[in-house]
Structures are given as C-alpha cells and as structure tokens.
Amino acid sequence: MQHIDMNETVISIRDLYKSFGEKHVLEGINLDLHKGENVAVLGRSGTGKSVLIKIIIGLLKPDAGTVKVLGEEVSQLDDVALRALRLKVGFSFQSSALYDSMTVGENLAFPLKRNNREFTPEQIRKTIDIVLDAIGLPETINQLPAELSGGQKKRIGIGRTLILRPEIMLYDEPTAGLDPITSMELNRLINAVKERFNTSSIIITHDLTCAKSVGDKIAVMDDGKFISQGTFDEVFTGNEELIKSFYDYNFIQ
C-alpha cells in the first residue's frame, strides 16, 4: 500500500482574481488541495466554478493571484512545461468529449499513442483493460459512443482521463444530466478512482448529493468568492442564508 502524505499540498490557490470586462468572475479565491483528498467546489451556475478549473490547467490566465500545481506556478510556465504539467492533471469534461468515430478502445488508446510513443500494442491493450475494469465497463471496448448511455459515456470519459495515470483529477459537473441512480454510481466511481489510483481531485458541481458523496472538503462559491469551506457537516450546520437555500433547493424541492 502506497503511503499518502495528506499534509502535502498539490494545488495551492492564493488571492485569485479574474474578470471579463466589467464582469468580475473570481474575487479573491483561496483554496488548497492536499494529496489524496477530494474537494467539491459547490455553487450555482455562473458563479465562476468552471473558470477556476480553466485557470488551474492554464487555459486562462488570472488577472491577479497565484495558482501552484504540483509546486509549479501555472501562469509562469512556457508551452513545453505547461504540456508536461497537463499530463499529470486529468480533466474530465462535462460532455465526456469522446470521438464519435472511434470505438471505446480506440478512444482510450488515443492519449496513450499521442503521449507515450514507446508503448507497444500489448502494453496499450493491457492499460486499456486495467482502466475499463476500474470503471466497470470492460464489455464496451468495441462499442462506439453512440451505442452507450449517458452514464457510460461519462465513465468512459473519466477512463480516458485516467489512462495517463494523472496525479490530480479535475471533474467538471460529473453528474450533470444524469438520473439519480446513475449519479450515485458515478459518485461511487469518483471515490473508487481516488482509492485505486491515489488521485487528488477537485470536483466542480452544483449537485449537493454529489458534493456530500465525494467531497472530503466542501468549498461553497457565490459571486466569485468562497463563502464557506469545511466538511459537509461543518458547512451545512450554519444559518448562512445562501447555504440554507442551497440545501433546501437540493433536498426539499
């Protein structure tokens, strides 16, 4: 069993600001992700959650503040260093982002062939089999995305992200558009990925059940700021009006 130092910080965000013209999207964000930890960033649509993810992987530059990923300040990296860092950070898109013309096996092989050119066909197949087993879909290897359910596509999207064995996983609204039972299956998968692949993860979501199921720590975002951080119970035992309304919307409606 690999020893995990939960005190090691793998993502450190300090005083992060980002605006688009007059629209202030992030206003002084601070967040730490520790090794072996899942942090659920919870907020309504349009609160800046996805912009935060894009800054973490260097798709957007912050206006002010710092983002360090695995000890490197992302905004200071050149293209070569940024590509190298992105190989260690898996990004699971909300849309699954699978190639429609490729089978599941070919979709999973694609990042391996592009980034690990020394892999033999046998090594590629073995790696695909390991990942398909981990996500519980070994029978889909020869299927096309059009033949899969929405939940299966999400799982394959996560599998394609896992294929390069990233140290960090970033999930963008993983349960969006899924029925409650499939959502719970995906939540269990996110937790299983952490245990099996020793990943540290940020999960962007507006789904309170997802946040409660997968988040070792919850960070609630509103109007570009974190208004509360802590365990689920710590965050949702207070009387803060926005947090109460968020809870009521998810669990009482």
Image (cartoon, helix red, strand yellow):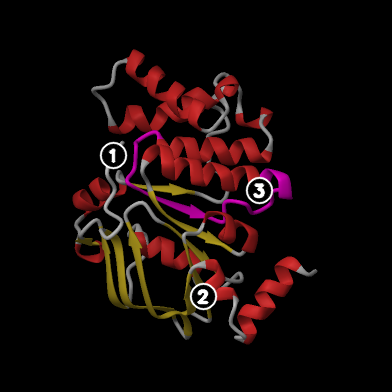
- Please name the amino acid that badge 2 sits on: Met
Query: Pointer 1: what residue?
Result: 2
- Tell me which corner region of the image, top left, top right, bottom left or bottom right, holds residue 53: bottom left
- Tell me which corner region of the image, top left, top right, bottom left or bottom right, holds residue 101: top right
**Extent of the magenta region:** 163-182
For the residues labelled 3 and 2, the Cα–Cα distance comes to 22 Å
What is the number of the mark on residue 248?
none
Residue, x 61% and y 22% (percent of image)? 143
- Please name the amino acid that badge 3 sits on: Ser
Element type where label 2 sits in the image: strand
Q: In the image, is residue 26 above or below residue 196? A: below
Q: Is residue 176 magenta?
A: yes
Query: Pointer 3: what residue?
Result: 183
Q: Give the foreground label among 1 and 2.
A: 1
Query: Pointer 2: what residue?
Result: 221
- The residue furthest right is 253
